[in-house]
Image (cartoon, rainbow, N blue to C red):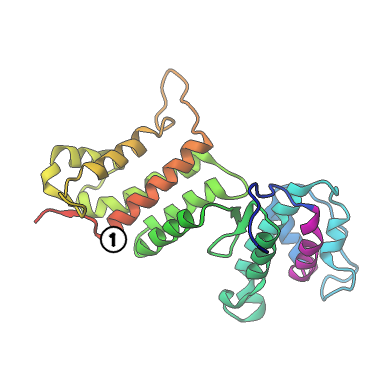
Amino acid sequence: MAGELPEEPYEGLPLHLRGHVDEWLTSAISYDEDVEQISLRLKREISWEPSRSSRGRFSYSPWMRMKILIPQDAEDVILDVLDAVLIHRSETYRKSTGYPFERDTAPEELEELLKAGGSAYTVSSERTHLERRVDPTARKSFENAVAAAHATSASNHLSEAWRAIYGRSPDAAKSYGEAIKAVEAAAIPIIQPNHARATLGTVRGELKANPTKWTFQISPGSIDPVLALISTLWDGQVNRHGGVAPTAPISERAAESAVHLAVTLVQWFASGAVRQAP
């Protein structure tokens, strides 16, 4: 069926997508000033030839002048450009057009292209960057947890954890750390609201010391499932402390698992599934 992903999504930018992506970038990058900002965001040196005029639209578009200086086989660079353009548009659309960012249809148009072309990448739910395409059910669980925790910083930390592992430049250590911060932000106000130095470790200690003080919504109400997930997440951060021996690095697989553990825990705490026993 048209639009379905192949069994193995394309990691780079396949030939059948390049022409469509060129058209999208030609429309999305309209001014020389856009190219300057996008080049800065790429954090890589890409020379480009500015026009003689510093303002206005051009028949020979800024993107085409930029593309000429990018090697034809540099698929990763083009994906990085798409990522940088999404970030740039999300930050400048309202300022440049006077309309809310939500009215910018370009991210949806790009997502339609990537999905139809079987890309391994998708436009984020916030429409601000590229991220790896994951199972729709897993992504929906993440979005639900972010929405449930919207009134706390757990929402921001969880979003950062997701982006750090599924974005264009994965950072496993950052992702794992943000996953823990997300659970701390969701759990501490419930378990240790008056503990000024509470961490996920002290939350675990409280649950261990007073298991009957807390209840979980699944019958018979034992807190053990919550404690098990917290312990797995906390003990798995092998790079948390220094010492004589070098700390082990966090793998991308471990960070991915940590993020999905955090999604579950944040959802439980934010939705009231974990609460003080009556």
Q: Quadrant of the N terminus?
A: bottom right
- The residue at 83%/46% (across/down) is 73
Structural crowding at the residue carrying mark 1, measured as other residues with C-alpha within 10 Å and reported as few (<14), some (14–19) or many (≥20): some
* Residue 221 image point, x, y percent: 16, 50
* Residue 75 image point, x, y percent: 77, 48
* Residue 80 image point, x, y percent: 70, 52
Is-magenta flag for residue 57? Answer: no
Farthest residue to the bottom: give it.
Answer: 98
In the image, is 221 to the left or to the right of 55? Answer: left
- The residue at 44%/31% (across/down) is 239
Residue 14 in view: yes
In the image, is 112 to the left or to the right of 100? Answer: right
- The residue at 84%/58% (across/down) is 66
| Prevalent SS, magenta region | helix
In the image, is 153 to the left or to the right of 159? Answer: left
Q: Quadrant of residue 58?
A: bottom right
* Residue 18 image point, x, y percent: 79, 58
Location of residue 246 with respect to 71 vertically, above or below: above
Location of residue 234 with respect to 23 vertically, above or below: above
Is-magenta flag for residue 21? Answer: yes
Residue 149 or residue 4, whichever sits in front: 4
Secondary structure of the residue carrying tag 1 is helix
Q: Quadrant of residue 88?
A: bottom right
- The residue at 36%/39% (across/down) is 233
In the image, is 86 to the left or to the right of 190? Answer: right
The residue range painted magenta reads: 15-32
Farthest residue to the left: give it.
Answer: 278
Residue wearing tag 1: 271
Identity, as a three-letter code, of the amino acid under mark 1: Ser
Q: Quadrant of the C terminus?
A: bottom left
Residue 203 in view: no
